[in-house]
Image (cartoon, rainbow, N blue to C red):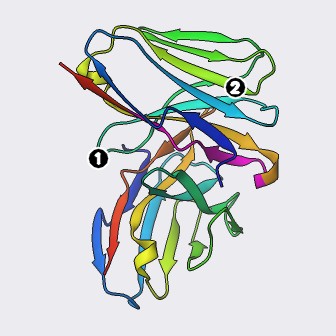
Amino acid sequence: GQQVMQIPQYQHVQEGEDFTTYCNSSTTLSNIQWYKQRPGGHPVFLIQLVKSGEVKKQKRLTFQFGEAKKNSSLHITATQTTDVGTYFCAAFLMEYGNKLVFGAGTILRVKS
Amino acid sequence: NAGVTQTPKFQVLKTGQSMTLQCAQDMNHNSMYWYRQDPGMGLRLIYYSASEGTTDKGEVPNGYNVSRLNKREFSLRLESAAPSQTSVYFCACPLQGAGGYTFGSGTRLTVV
């Protein structure tokens, strides 16, 4: 089962609205990664967060790693139709031999 | 996606047939990974190879075998395909210095 829980599963927003997806783990994470997958495409690496409380920005995307390193979020300001896709968080988990384990993903649809 | 190349892109198999999914990387990286993606499940690790000549099981290895032929190539074999193996298969290897993985374009497999 999923050791990295991601919510919501699905979100449909009006263009220009904000969007946030959350990632949670019961264990402390060494780091967390975020990926974007366009419909019909492959996952594309966006960013990696390592430090407790870390915040990084990429244009309209803001990534945050929790103080306890058990949760993370991705926030998109003023969504555009180009933001459509599935956003995944992923983390290296000791119980999986320190291999990269993915959350189930949040599907974002943007209505123009 | 010049770093990781997968073939074929699409395949339809009958139950019980066998096939090999091919993956090659030109990034000179030691590690390579095979994931499968199913709706609502994210990406799940099937097998990985930490270096040439070594392979190990991931989260969902049953029904699959792998071969790390050389540093560039890592193949995934289905000996007797089952409908439950209908999925999208991705090969991946680590990005140099960035912390994330780069993925191939995927193989969309349907077993009927």
Mark 2 neighbour density, 10 Å: few (under 14) some (14–19) many (20 or more): many
Q: Is residue B100 left or right of residue A52?
A: left
The mark found on residue A16 in the picture is none
Check if mark 1 and mark 2 are on a common chain.
yes
Residue at image position (69%, 67%) is: B57
Amino acid type shown at disc 2: Asn
Q: Which chain hosts label 2?
A: A
In the displayed orientation, state which residue is furthest to the bottom.
B16
Image quarter hosting the N terminus of chain B: top left
Residue at image position (34%, 69%) is: B109
Residue at image position (43%, 68%) is: B22
Label 1 vs 2, first from the N-terminus? 1
Q: Position of residue B58 (x, y in %)?
A: 67, 62
- Name the residue that disc number 1 marks: A40
Q: Is residue B98 visible?
A: no
Q: Please tell me how many numbered marks the rendered image carries.
A: 2
Up the image or down, B93 lies above or below B35; here it is: above
B30 and B47: which is toward the camera: B47
Q: Is residue B10 visible?
A: yes
Residue at image position (47%, 88%) is: B80
Up the image or down, B74 lies above or below B44; here it is: below
Magenta stretch: includes residue A105: yes
The mark found on residue A71 in the picture is 2
B105 and A69: which is toward the camera: A69
Of helix, strand and loop, which one carries label 1? loop
Amino acid type shown at disc 1: Gly
Up the image or down, B34 lies above or below A104; here it is: below
Range shown magenta:
A96-107
In the displayed orientation, state which residue is furthest to the left.
A112
Q: Nearer the viewer, mark 1 or mark 2?
A: 2
User: Distance from label 1 to label 2 (Cα)?
Assistant: 28 Å
